[in-house]
Amino acid sequence: MGIDANGAAWLLDRARAGVKFDRTLMIGRQNFFVGRKEWHRLLARAQTPLPNAWSSMECFHGVHAEPFFQALGAKTVNSMDATDYEGADTIHDLNQLVPLDWRERYDVVFDGGSLEHVFQFPTALLNCLRLVKNGGHFIAYTPANNYFGHGFYQFSPELWWRALSKESGFQIEKLVAVEFGWRVRMFEINDPAQIGNRISLVNHAYVLLFLCARKIGPTPESFGPVMQSDYAATWDQSRKAPPSNAPQKPNWQRRLLEAAPGLARFLERAHYRWFNSRLSFRNRAAFTPCQPRF
């Protein structure tokens, strides 16, 4: 778990966007994986004059991230983990609900790569949301594509858009996919419910999702029925117009499968390849190129 140069740029961007880090909780004690020269190159990209705390920061590669969050304005930085082996000051297993008196303690709860390792993920996420003050933020970057075997889970944009909704007391301010290929590329991700289609991705490099969501209301005691947006829309339409009992006509796919099954299956596999623009970052309905601007 740790913050690299891209994660640092993302957090600097969020600080400039108005996120208050006064009381910050790290889920897992985060390391800081930014070298000295890398840090100064990062700050050289700043769009406006830098706060003194940023330009004078002395938190560099191989140390824990408390000084970095202090440079972002944190007066208190805590870390929560299931054990104290990395020096976390708050010991709690996120598979279990946090105590009632811990709720709404923090302006920012930051997960830099822990939730995918917690088996009871909905409970762990609910814990993180409960710990955020009203008006505060839950910030995370989590694995998406090509992290097979890294943890228990990889996460999709659909999960975050549906889980961090007004029903859970949150509103997503920014959701970004970061692709670590030969060059790092970033794309802001639209809500699948707004574009009326699933957002899928087939690519050759690993991808993280950078997430920032603001708390706008109380967090419920449990998640209600969270439905994938395309299923919810389909079911809603089916209630309005019951399905017809008329027999369906065979389409060209069924005809091809009956006439030439080998060719049909080959074309089916070819459809789910990276060169299909609907399944790539070239899908502009889903992905908008972006860069942190701090």
Image (tube, rainbow, N blue to C red):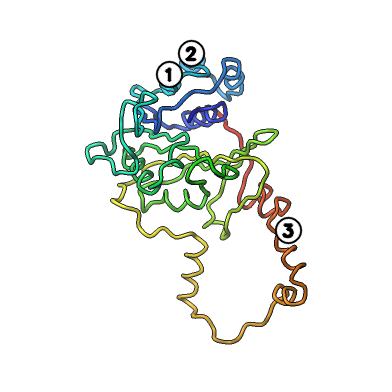
User: Circle 1: is it few (<14), some (14-19), or many (20+) Cα within 10 Å?
Assistant: some
Q: Please identify the quadrant where the C terminus is shown.
A: top right
Residue at coordinates 32% horizontally, 25% vertically from top-left?
A: 89
Secondary element type, mark 2:
loop
User: Circle 3: is it few (<14), some (14-19), or many (20+) Cα within 10 Å?
Assistant: few
Residues at discs 1 and 3 in contact (Cβ within 8 Å): no
| Figure quadrant of residue 115 | top left
- Label 3 belongs to which residue? 270
Q: Is 93 rendered above or below residue 37?
A: below
Residue 263 vs residue 11: left or right? right
User: Circle 2: is it few (<14), some (14-19), or many (20+) Cα within 10 Å?
Assistant: few
| Position in image of residue 196 (x %, y %) | 56, 60
Residues at discs 2 and 1 in contact (Cβ within 8 Å): yes
The amino acid type, in three-letter code, at marker 3 is Ala
Q: Earlier in the sequence, mark 1 or mark 3?
A: 1
The amino acid type, in three-letter code, at marker 2 is Glu
Q: Which numbered disc covers residue 103?
A: none
Nearer to me, 217 or 126? 126
User: What separation in Å lies between label 2 and label 1 (alpha carbons)?
Assistant: 8 Å
| Position in image of residue 131 (x %, y %) | 32, 38
Q: Earlier in the sequence, mark 3 or mark 2?
A: 2
Secondary element type, mark 3:
helix
- Front: mark 1 or 3: 3
Residue at coordinates 58% horizontally, 59% vertically from top-left?
A: 197
| Position in image of residue 30 (x %, y %) | 44, 27
Secondary element type, mark 1:
helix
- Label 1 belongs to which residue? 67
Q: Which numbered disc covers residue 58?
A: 2
Residue 166 vs residue 41: left or right? left
